[in-house]
Amino acid sequence: MCGITTVEDALYAEGCGADAIGIVMFSDSPRSVQSSRVREIFSSLTSSTMKVIVTHTKSEEDLKEILALKPDAVQISHPFPFPSNRNVKVFRMVKRGDHLLPDSDAFVVDESYGSGKLYNSTFASEVVKLSKVPVILAGGLNPENVKEAIEIVQPDAVDVSSGVEVEPGIKDKEKIRLFLHNCKEAVL
């Protein structure tokens, strides 16, 4: 569950079964929040829920601030190099034409880079076949199409933000519940 901006939405998504909570930083997105909000949201979650910071930053200083928050993973679009002895997972966003960088712990197939544009099933399926690490499908997912997307692409996980919102940064509880329900039905 990505683009979380409040403790209330984070706890609701976690309670409905979300495996990970994504928070946007250093972005022009209306979902982007400051470090203090990230700490507040992360501290409200259980240890079993993955805490992810999502960013499009190209600044090394921003990346240092992100890493200081000690997320479980960083979902990043810029090809920053990461050392092999790091204490954080690196989820690299990929679109057609990108190289699948070997220091990645997962690839996030989201050609729209968070704009909500529908994923390309052919490209996403190709990444699933080629990848040696987990693949997370994103882009235009919502409660109505997630089950079919999982069945077609067969990713290791799915990522949603705008598809479960009332408005940017404000989640719709019923859409969250239905999205997670439909994800579970697709993998049964």
Image (tube, helix red, strand yellow):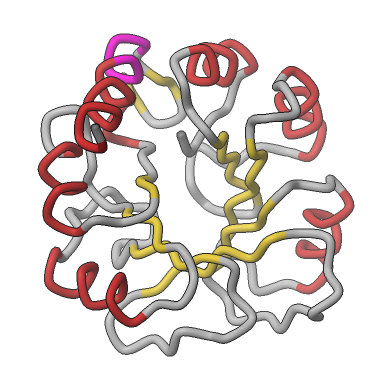
- Name the image quarter holding residue 113: bottom left
Residue that extends furthest to the front in the rendered view of this protein: 188
Residue appearing at x 35%, y 46% in the figure: 158
Instruction: Please give the count of numbered marks on the rendered protein.
Output: 0
Highlighted range, magenta: 173-177
Q: Is 140 placed above or below 143 here? A: below
Q: Is the magenta stretch mostly helix, strand or loop?
A: helix
Q: Does residue 82 appear left or right of residue 185 in this picture?
A: right
Q: Quick one: 147 or 41, which is closer to the camera? A: 147
Where does residue 159 sit, x and y in percent of width and height? 39, 44
Residue appearing at x 52%, y 69% in the figure: 92
Figure quadrant of the C terminus = top left
Q: Does the magenta stretch include residue 165?
A: no
Q: Is residue 175 magenta?
A: yes
Q: Does residue 140 appear left or right of residue 170 in this picture?
A: left
Residue appearing at x 19%, y 74% in the figure: 123
Residue appearing at x 71%, y 24% in the figure: 41
- Name the image quarter holding residue 24: top right
Q: Is 52 placed above or below 106 here? A: above
Q: Does residue 53 appear left or right of residue 68 in this picture?
A: left
Where does residue 54 sit, x and y in percent of width and height? 58, 52
Q: Quick one: 34 or 109, which is closer to the camera? A: 109
Where does residue 96 sit, x and y in percent of width and height? 27, 82
Q: Does residue 76 appear left or right of residue 186 in this picture?
A: right
Where does residue 116 sit, x and y in percent of width and height? 27, 48
- Name the image quarter holding residue 108: bottom left
Q: Is 121 placed above or below 10 here? A: below
